[in-house]
Image (cartoon, rainbow, N blue to C red):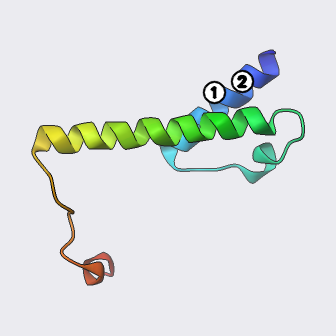
Amino acid sequence: MDDALLAYHAGRVDGAAGFRDPQIAEDPEVGADYRVGLLDGRIAAFHLIREVRGILGVEDSFYDGPDDLIP
């Protein structure tokens, strides 16, 4: 149980940071827990970004078109 909780927490932290550890994700014992935490972390990061955009009053994209992404 402790290993599953640690894997979930590691996945949540990695997901919020936008990182995925393929070695842990493919582990047969704790990989599923890590992947669930990863998804939860990504969802939490999305909600945080959405809240910050709401506070700043940003409703549209920061970019006018696809060319704005290329420096």
58 sits to left or right of 70: left
Q: Can residue 11 be seen?
A: no
Q: What element carries label 2?
A: helix
Classify 10 Å Cα crowding around label 1: few (below 14), some (14-19), many (20 and above): some
Classify 10 Å Cα crowding around label 2: few (below 14), some (14-19), many (20 and above): some
The image quadrant that residue 37 belongs to is top right
Residue drawn at point x = 14 percent, y = 37 percent: 55
Q: Is mark 1 on a helix, strand or loop?
A: helix
Percent across and percent down for residue 69 are 31, 76
Total numbered circles = 2
Q: Is residue 53 positioned above or below 44 on the image?
A: below
Residue drawn at point x = 79 percent, y = 16 percent: 2
Q: What residue type is labelled 1?
A: His
The image quadrant that residue 14 belongs to is top right
Residue drawn at point x = 33 percent, y = 81 percent: 70
The residue sitting at the right extreme is: 28
Q: Which amino acid does label 2 sit on?
A: Leu
Quarter of the image with the N terminus is top right
Cα distance between the residues tagged 2 and 1: 5 Å
Percent across and percent down for residue 57 are 9, 45
Q: Can residue 49 be seen?
A: yes
Quarter of the image with the C terminus is bottom left
19 sits to left or right of 3: left
The residue sitting at the left extreme is: 57
Q: Are marks 2 and 1 in contact (CB under 8 Å)?
A: yes
The circle drawn on residue 9 is 1
